[in-house]
Amino acid sequence: MSFKTFFIIVDTIVVIVIIALVVSIIAGRGGPYYEVAQKAFIEAEKKSESLDLNKPGVINKISQLYRKVFEKYPDSRWADDAIYRLASKIEPTEEESLILYRKLIRDYPDSEYVDKSIYTIGMGLYSRGNFEAAIREFGELITNYSFSEFAEKAYFNIAMCRYGLEKWDQALLEFQDFEVRYPESDLIDDSRTYRGIIAVNKGDYEEGLKIFQQILRDFPNSYSIDNVHFNIASAYYEQGKFQEAEAEFQKIIKEYSSSEFTEESQVMLGATYEKQNKNDQAIAALQKALINYPEGKYASKAENYLAEIYLKLKDFSQAIATYQKIADNTKYDYDSRKEAQYKIGKLYEDQENYTKAIESYKKLIDNFPKPTSQLNSEVDKVDKAYILNLQQKTGQPEQTSTKPSA
């Protein structure tokens, strides 16, 4: 046998062995591999349907089951399904959710879930207030998946991101572009609503009100109708048209009682009464808001308005008591609480009750050591030196903290 013949035989054997190995692998993957992967996916699905995901620790159990599918069987047809199903069960604002969606996009670029994953990442970033990053995600969806069912919403949400960044002119152009591209969209009324709000934010109340009135005519059954009425009321209020504002706020309270704008409308109704010197009605409206929404988003705002009305009526004891309620309520935001404590001290100081002023300012320093979010705020200028200056007026010993020394 010649060397040439020998090498041909060897090469043939090697090829046969390689083919056999490939066939063996394919046969293995086509049989038990895929069957086990399918069973693992079905098990994860059944468990996720039978368990309460809101209970502590449950999401971790579900996560392990889905991860078994895409970590042990990454080449199976259920791997991308498992990633998507797990990601969709986690809040899109959570980092783990974003990581899973990005894994799906990276590892399974042909998956049917890619466009929705990109959109969901964008919405998660939007919800976190990361508007610039959200714009990039929505832009990628529009560029690479222009025929996706999510492209329409992506265009709209880019405009919403500009709005969130308070880039009014850019947002306005984006909303107008959206309306041209999708004239039959269910989001047209929302787009117009935000164009009206932008006009009001820019001080063009006439244009804003014009847009709002057009929405009321063209979309009387819009889901945004309460938002429209609230912004009409707010525009009137900003213009000093308090009677018109009062009528709109009352309309929201009566006709849209379950609206997200009802609480704020109740508070602003009190503000409109105060602007018209209807002080008793203002107090009643604000107290009603606090009764109906004791832990509401605008509760501190209502109490602030109440305190201002008491000051206007020269009822200083009620004003101080109201400010103290704000300062002591740990559920209120830090700035509101610190400002309320400052106002108490300032009230006493203006009345030349320096002893009480010093006591209040000490609480301000001890309980609110961090500055507010407002730059150069008067609230943050009260320090030990400020208190020492007041103490000199009373002859008190120079002690600047109510806390015991170490």
Image (spheres, grey):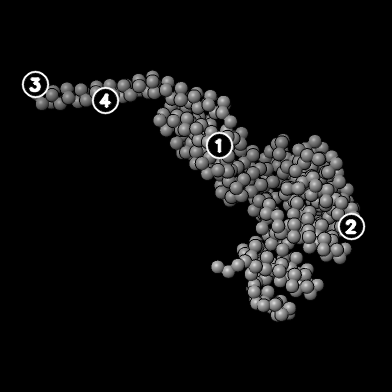
- Helix, strand or loop at label 4? It is helix
Q: Earlier in the sequence, mark 1 or mark 3?
A: 3
Disc 3 marks which residue?
1
Tell me which amino acid carries mark 1.
Answer: Pro
Residue 274 is at least partly visible in this image? yes
- Asked whether the beta carbons under mark 1 and mark 3 sit within 8 Å of each other, the answer is no
Left or right of residue 85: residue 209:
right
Disc 1 marks which residue?
56
Q: Earlier in the sequence, mark 2 or mark 1?
A: 1
Tell me which amino acid carries mark 3.
Answer: Met
- CA separation, marks 4 and 3? 25 Å
Tell us which disc is closer to us: 3 or 2: 2
- Asked if 290 appears above or below 376 in the picture, the reply is above
- Label 2 neighbour load within 10 Å: few <14, some 14-19, many 20+: many
- Asked if 17 appears above or below 343 in the picture, the reply is above
| Residue in the image at 80% along x and 60% along y | 307
